[in-house]
Image (cartoon, rainbow, N blue to C red):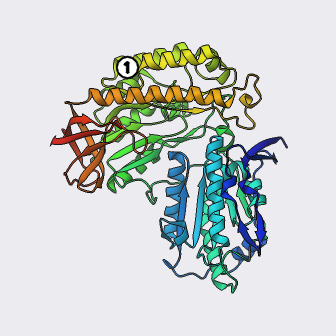
Amino acid sequence: GARAAWSTPRALYRRRVGRRLVSDQSMLRSDIFFSIALAGGAAAVRLSPRMAAAAAAPIRITPQEHSVALVALGCPKNTVDAEVMLGDLQRHGLRVVREPENADIVVVNTCAFVEDAKRESVAAIVDAARLKADRSSRVRGLYVTGCMAQRYAEELADELPEVDAVVGFESYADIPSHVLATLSTSDADDTEPGLDSAAERASVLVGAATVPFRPENDRFQLTAAHTAYLRVAEGCDHACSFCAIPGFRGAFRSKPFDTALAEARLLVERGVREINLIAEDTNQFGSDWGEEDPRRLSHFLRELSALPGLRWIRLLYCYPSYFSDDLVAEIATNPKVVKYIDIPLQHLAAPTLQRMRRPGAKATISLLERLRREVPSLVLRTTFICGFPGESDDDHDELVRQARRLGFERGGAFSYSAEDGTPAASMAGQVEEETKQARKDELVALFQEASAAWAEARVGSELRVMVDRMDGLDAVGRTEHDAPDIDGAVRIPAMPLPPGSEVLVRVLYADVDGELVGEVVGSPPQ
């Protein structure tokens, strides 16, 4: 089959002393990597002898006797995967605990988006492997899931035999049965936890990347109880030259309309008051149904807004296409759809966008200007890639100029990372790391300046705020213009309020970090 190279931190190199793992975390430096060849894209299901024996043995465990901890890495789509996994395991009798050192089973749900994400994922696996190899640890099983498992299963299995199984998307439903088998045989063993399997290669349970949707409503929420992510689609059919996601997340497919709506209804019945819609390209929802089903995202927003108890609907991960007249009108006029759109644009200079194989600069800028005109009080969030191959000083200057002119209130920037198997990885004109970092720093400073200016302009105004948590005697929440975990916060001093409360807050001032401070003046219209 086709072969591709991949990079991963040198921390995977390790030595064994008395069959115990010894890892040098100081080796997790960004300048130390090694490459391994991989038969790319092939599905594999291979049980280790130990796991095969466990699968054949009768299951003998007591419900709630054993526990599982999950290390959640990556994007909200990974968060949903993790929540569904934990829900499955909980229904099979395992207790969910927060800390890996307190668990019998550790699941590391990895991310493989860029090099930094891979590095963080490998470090988390190594930490969990050390726990399993420790004679005093209670950890008996280690499972690796997520995008890195789907993409690099064989390498992980070769390099980390402490791992019981590397599990891809197609096999997620089978995780509970394998975990129970691991625990059952572990209970029957007389050896110390983690040592008997140290020399054995991990099982690989990786199938196709394009897999059917599983039910995602009965999950163990990792988010706060009042806010949740709702996945409306999966996969991607775009051919961006820098991106490997279609190769391991599969082709684009929309979740069935009624299935997604039923999941939302159950979330709201459980107390969720804010739903954040996610996908690789959220606003493409329904585009693959053709004329057989004319419903699209605008129709879905309308149906969601009819759910009693749901207060905020947020659009994350939109693509700079698929903004139909109906969708723009629904965003503008539906009071439950917050006036906030996340559109990762990657760049705004025409030559760079062309090399990226992204929508053109003229059409993208025209769309942004239209959204500004038609959606009142709109806050836009975006992300940019800095130092893409061939990006000239003029290209970067044009990006900065347009970003400043368009006035993104929220944003992020990251340095280009060459992904194996992508056209951009072999393009001429690779940019020096120092230049990438300098360009990134300039954009981050621009976003910080814009965010601070937006916060300062809110002083004296009244804003809808949803409370996320208590910090001592202060309530801490967000405006509708702030997504959970990534944007700003509002502090309401000396005001005990339950999480999920929605209040009307008068902004008194913005502190030096851009956090708004205000006082409650009432409740928003219901």
Q: Where is residue 403 drawn, in percent x and y?
A: 47, 20
Q: Amino acid at mark 1?
A: Arg
User: Which of these two is toward me, 360 or 510?
Assistant: 510
Residue 131 as seen in the image, left or right of residue 31: left
Q: Where is residue 475 drawn, in percent x and y?
A: 25, 50
Quadrant of the image occupied by residue 185: bottom right
Q: Residue at x 71, y 55 (%)?
A: 11
Tell me: residue 157, above or below residue 140. Answer: above
Q: Which residue sits furthest right?
A: 1
How many badges with numbers are in the image?
Answer: 1
Quarter occupied by the C terminus: top left
Quadrant of the image occupied by residue 339: top left
Q: Residue at x 79, y 42 (%)?
A: 5
- Where disc 1 sits, the SS reads helix
Tell me: residue 501, above or below residue 133. Answer: above
- Judge whether residue 458 can be spotted in this image: yes
User: Which of these two is toward me, 428 or 152?
Assistant: 428
Task: Report which residue position mark 1 lands on.
Answer: 372
Quarter occupied by the N terminus: top right
Q: Where is residue 219 drawn, in percent x and y?
A: 46, 58
